[in-house]
Image: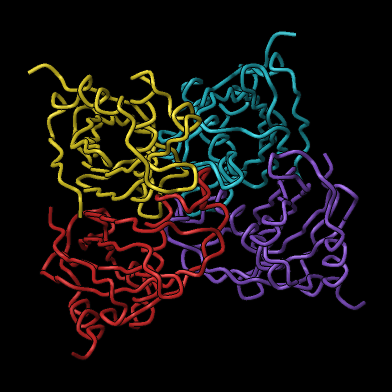
Chain colours: A purple, B yellow, C red, D cyan
Amino acid sequence: MRLSLTPSTDAADYPFVHRIRTRFSETDAMGIVHHSAYAPYLEESRAALLRHAGRPYDQVREEGVDFSVLELYVRYRQPLRFDELVDVNVVVGAVTRTTFQVAYLLQVDGDTRSTAVTVHGAVDPTGRPTRMPAWLADVARVQTPPA
Amino acid sequence: MRLSLTPSTDAADYPFVHRIRTRFSETDAMGIVHHSAYAPYLEESRAALLRHAGRPYDQVREEGVDFSVLELYVRYRQPLRFDELVDVNVVVGAVTRTTFQVAYLLQVDGDTRSTAVTVHGAVDPTGRPTRMPAWLADVARVQTPPA
Amino acid sequence: MRLSLTPSTDAADYPFVHRIRTRFSETDAMGIVHHSAYAPYLEESRAALLRHAGRPYDQVREEGVDFSVLELYVRYRQPLRFDELVDVNVVVGAVTRTTFQVAYLLQVDGDTRSTAVTVHGAVDPTGRPTRMPAWLADVARVQTPPA
Amino acid sequence: MRLSLTPSTDAADYPFVHRIRTRFSETDAMGIVHHSAYAPYLEESRAALLRHAGRPYDQVREEGVDFSVLELYVRYRQPLRFDELVDVNVVVGAVTRTTFQVAYLLQVDGDTRSTAVTVHGAVDPTGRPTRMPAWLADVARVQTPPA
C-alpha cells in the first residue's frame, strides 16, 4: 500500500476546488449517490486541476503520458443526494520520481460528506511505467497554499 | 433514422438469449434499474452472441473492425429491479453493405420488461466507415430460427 | 412506439441549452464517449431545464411525482471525445394528459454530434401512472421560442 | 480509517469466488477497464456471497437492513481488459457489533490483477446506523476456510 496522505477535513488545507452537481443516474435504490460514482467525481476534479494548472489532460495524453490509478481510497462519511452541489477540494502531494498522490475533501455547503486519496503512476501509451513529467512537481508546489 | 426493426414480444422469435443479473449499482433513487443501464445490457448480449457465433468481439476488433452504434432505441415497458435475472433475447436483422440492426426482448421469468433496437456500422480503428465483414450476414442467417 | 418528435439540427429551434463537459470515465476503448453515457447527459439537461423553469426535480419528486422514462432514442452522428464541452439543446413537446416528449441536439462548438428524443410519463412514488402536473404544459409553452 | 484487513494474493485464503465478465462499456480510452468499474464488481460479488449464504440482499433489505459502504480501498496491480473473465475471491472479516469488512482478490486465469477491501455498516431504511444482524457473524464464520 503506497497510500500515505491523510486528507484534512478543513477546506482551507486545499488550494483547489471543483464543483460538481450530482446526477439522478448516480443515485441508487437507497436514495443516495452510489459509492461507485465518487471515483468519476475525483477524476473529473483532477482533470479540472490540471486544466487550471495549464496542463489539460487530453494534451498530457497527446504528449504520451497517462496517469494510471494505482490505488483508490474513499471514506464515505455522510451520503450525497441527488441534485446536490459538491465542492471537491483537491491537493496534490507525496510526489516521487514515479508516483504522486492526491487528497480530496467533498463538501456540500461546508458540510463534509467524504474524504478520499488516489495514488497515480505515469505510464506510456502502451501502459508501461514511464518518468513522471517534471512539471508535475510544479503543479503540486503551485497548489500548496501559503502557510 | 435508419431504425426499421420492430421487436417482437414473443421470445420464440429470437434465436439467441443471454442472461444478465441486475446490479445494485444500476438501480436509482426510484428503486428500479436506471434507464441508462440497459445499453450496457444490450451490448453485453451482442458480445455474447458474437462469441456464440465464433466471432468474439475482441478478436473482431483485432482484425481491425469495430461495430459503432449509430442509433439506439429502448422502450421501457415494466421496470427491472435489483437482483432480477433478465433474459435478453437477441436477433440480428436488416443487414446492408454498411449497417446492421439488432432487436432485443428483455424478459424476467417470461414477463416482458423492455424491447430495444440498435443500429450498427462497421468502422476501422480510426473510426472511419469500412466494409461490413462478410461473415456478419452469416451470423444473421445462422441466428434465424426455423419457421 | 409513442416517439413522434423529430429533433431539429438547428440550435435556434431549442429554447434551452445546458453545457456538460465529458468525463474520462465515460470514454471507452474505441477512444470515444461510450454510447451509454448519453442518457445521463440528457437526464442532467432535463433536470437543468426544470430547475431553470422553477421546478427543481427533487422538489417535484417531494410533491409525489416522478417522470419515468418510457422511451429513449439516440442517434449518434459524430462521436464525442474526452474533455469536450457539449451544448445539450433541449425542447419539450408533444405534451398529452399522461406523457410528454423531449427532443435534444448535442453540439460541440456548433458542430452537431447527436440528436435524441425521450418520452416520459408521470408516476407516483409507487411507480403507478398519475396525472401530469398542470405546470408541465406551461414549461413546454414557456420554452417554445418565438417564431 | 477503520480499514484494517490486508488482502492476501493467494486465492486459497478466500472461501468464496464469484466470476464476472468485463463489459466493453466498462473500458476507457486507455483501452483498459476503468478504475471506477471495480466497485460494482465488488458489490456484485458481495451480493453473490450473501445469496450463497442463504441471505439474498434484496431479502435482507426487505427485513429493514442495508449494508452501507463506509470505506473503499482498491489497489490496481495489473489492468483488466475487455471480455476477460475475472474471478473475484471474497472473504468476510473484522466483524464488530456495528461494522464488518470484506477483502477481495481479483484474478484472471490465476493472474492477480487487483486487491480490495470494503468496510460496511448496518443502517435502517432511513440511513441511520442499526444493529448488525446476528447471522452476519455466521456468514463470516462459515466462509472461513479450514486451516
Residue B21 vs residue C64: left or right? right
Work out whether D49 lies above or below B24.
above
View extreme (bottom): residue: C146
Answer left or right for C85 relative to A2.
left
Q: Nearer the viewer, residue B112 or C94?
A: C94
How far across and down, in percent of the image, does residue B105 sit? 21, 35
Where the N terminus of chain B falls, by quadrant? Answer: bottom left
Quadrant where the C terminus of chain B is found in the figure = top left
- Give residue A111's quadrant in the image: bottom right
| Number of numbered discs overlaid on the protein picture | 0
Residue B10 point in image, percent of width and height: 12, 30
Comparing A60 with D98, the one in front is: A60
Side of C61 relative to A74 (left or right): left
Q: Residue at x 53, y 39 (%)?
A: D40
- Residue drawn at x 46%, y 21% as measured from the top left: D54
Residue in view at x 68 percent, y 20 percent:
D111
- Residue A89 in the image, given as x and y percentages of width and height: 71, 68
Is residue A18 left or right of A3 when viewed as pictured?
left
Residue occupying the point 60% across, 59% down: A41
In the image, residue C51 above or below residue B1: below
Give the percent coordinates (x, y) of residue D79.
66, 34
- Does residue A136 lie above or below D91 as drawn? below
Q: Is residue C115 above or below residue B100?
A: below
Q: Residue furthest right?
A: A147
Looking at this view, name the residue that lies furthest to the left. Answer: B147
Front-most of residues A50 and B33: A50
